[in-house]
Image (spheres, helix red, strand yellow):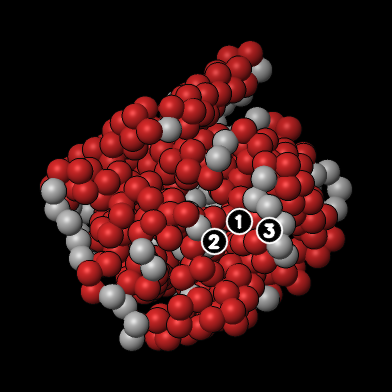
């Protein structure tokens, strides 16, 4: 099987990140952060770099498609917490399916002239997810080969958006404000937008299939985060610079398409809408395909309920069906803002334990203890800030997060104690030798 090159794996990560944020939750981020949105993307990128420090060190040496769960199992061993985190990691894909399907619907319905109602949205979300389930059943390889083209297309659309709109920015619209109210909004938006960068994790999930992973995994992680951060900041500057904050938040479902009208007219609205549909659709396909495959990969190591292990492409598809079905259920139960905060909470919890595991593994694989402790404190603070925002502004999301965490723990305990399932140790995960540990 041909290995993925550095350019190919960066394109996959960049494509996933852009699809998950700029087109999906940009308007919601603007509603929370206001004119400080560019700073919020910068700050959330800093959080991603904190996690990237551990991912780049561990991911270049622990070569496993189980991704962060491979790190956690190596660092923490066979515990109920590790098992629950493996389920939470899979649930990240489940909730992201809901997020992306809502992002697609937010651009699709206005484009075809239909009302953004609950019924219309639910129907589109159902058939969209069903389409990709069928597509993954029959032709996922062909879709996978087109990912580089899709990424180039949507990045080109965003670059046109940036270049065309940069000259008409109104400076007063993007002036940051640092009073107490705006600072609170900045922090809240930054922890929500943290999920905007979670796509870089696809690099370690695919590490077994990357050329020279010891060298290319760290490069791909850092470069993909940097590329996406620059795009996020520039797009937010152009959007807020050309529309009032009220206009952006009023059009939060398709904010970028509306923002393109002042300088690109109806052509810009059509172009950006098509780019958004292409972007969210490709990311949704990757989420459904990746979520089912993650379930299978983790099941092989005894880290998910055994029925996922029966999923074999073109034969038994339980992992694919359950991943897609639960994603649609989340889309029905929660609005876009709630789904975004739930996703951020779940992925941040996994990241916290990645750093805890890295602290335990640092003597074997490298890493500075002071940096790791500071990173852990910051991420715990991010997680607390997310729960605080949910409790104050999105109470349903808070309950959804608690249900997600408790559901993972209950499921893990059921399969561990009722069915006597244990996690397999490292004999199934390959390690690359290294001559010198990372610092």
Would you name the residue on which mark 3 appears? 109
Which x, y percent locates residue 9? Answer: 51, 71
Would you name the residue on which mark 2 appears? 254
Which x, y percent locates residue 30? Answer: 37, 55
Quarter of the image that includes the C terminus = bottom left
Instruction: Please identify the quarter of the rendering in which residue 263 is found.
Output: bottom left
Residue placed most toward the observer, 126 or 45 = 126
Tell me the residue at 49%/75% (across/down).
260
Circles 1 and 2, Cβ within 8 Å, touching? The answer is yes
Instruction: Please identify the quarter of the rendering in which residue 254 is found.
Output: bottom right
In the image, 103: left or right of 131? left
Residue 255 higher or lower than 335, as above or below: below
Residue placed most toward the observer, 378 or 399 = 399
Which x, y percent locates residue 117? Answer: 67, 45
Residue 99 higher or lower than 173, as above or below: above
Q: Earlier in the sequence, mark 1 or mark 2?
A: 1
Q: Which mark is residue 106?
A: 1
Tell me the residue at 40%/81% (across/down).
165
Residue placed most toward the observer, 198 or 395 = 395
Circles 3 and 1, Cβ within 8 Å, touching? The answer is yes
């Amino acid at each position: 099987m041909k290995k993925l090159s550095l350019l190919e794996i960066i394109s996959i990560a960049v494509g996933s990140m852009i699809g998950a944020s700029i087109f999906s939750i940009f308007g919601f981020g603007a509603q929370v952060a206001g004119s400080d949105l560019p700073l919020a993307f910068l700050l959330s990128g800093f959080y991603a770099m904190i996690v990237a420090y551990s991912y780049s060190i561990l991911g270049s040496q622990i070569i496993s498609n189980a991704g962060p769960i491979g790190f956690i199992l190596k660092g923490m061993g066979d515990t109920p917490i590790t098992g629950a985190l493996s389920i939470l990691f899979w649930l990240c894909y489940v909730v992201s399916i809901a997020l992306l399907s809502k992002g697609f619907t937010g651009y699709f319905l206005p484009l075809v002239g239909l009302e953004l109602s609950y019924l219309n949205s639910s129907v589109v979300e159902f058939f969209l997810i069903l389409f990709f389930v069928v597509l993954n059943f029959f032709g996922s390889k062909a879709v996978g080969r087109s990912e580089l083209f899709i990424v180039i297309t949507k990045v080109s659309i965003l670059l046109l958006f940036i270049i065309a709109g940069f000259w008409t920015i109104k400076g007063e619209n993007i002036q940051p404000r640092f009073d107490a109210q705006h600072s609170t909004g900045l922090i809240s938006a930054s922890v929500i937008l943290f999920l905007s960068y979670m796509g870089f994790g696809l690099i370690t999930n695919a590490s077994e299939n990357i050329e020279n992973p010891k060298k290319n995994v760290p490069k791909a992680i850092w470069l993909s985060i940097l590329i996406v951060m620059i795009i996020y900041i520039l797009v937010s500057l152009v959007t807020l610079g050309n529309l009032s904050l009220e206009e952006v938040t009023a059009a939060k479902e398709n904010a970028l398409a509306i923002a393109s009208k002042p300088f690109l007219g109806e052509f810009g609205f059509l172009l950006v809408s098509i780019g958004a549909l292409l972007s969210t659709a490709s990311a949704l396909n990757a989420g459904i395909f990746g979520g089912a495959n993650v379930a299978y990969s983790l099941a092989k190591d005894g880290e998910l309920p055994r029925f996922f292990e029966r999923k074999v492409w073109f034969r038994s598809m339980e992992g694919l069906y359950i991943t897609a079905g639960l994603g649609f259920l989340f889309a029905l139960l929660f609005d876009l803002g709630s789904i975004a905060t739930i996703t951020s909470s779940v992925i941040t919890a996994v990241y916290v334990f990645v750093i805890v595991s890295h602290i335990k593994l640092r003597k074997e694989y490298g890493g500075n203890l002071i940096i790791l402790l500071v990173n852990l404190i910051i991420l715990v603070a991010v997680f607390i800030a997310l729960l605080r925002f949910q409790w104050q502004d999105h109470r349903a999301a808070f309950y959804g997060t608690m249900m997600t965490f408790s559901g993972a723990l209950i499921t893990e305990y059921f399969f561990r104690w009722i069915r006597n399932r244990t996690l397999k140790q490292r004999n199934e995960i390959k390690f690359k030798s290294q001559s010198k540990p990372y610092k």
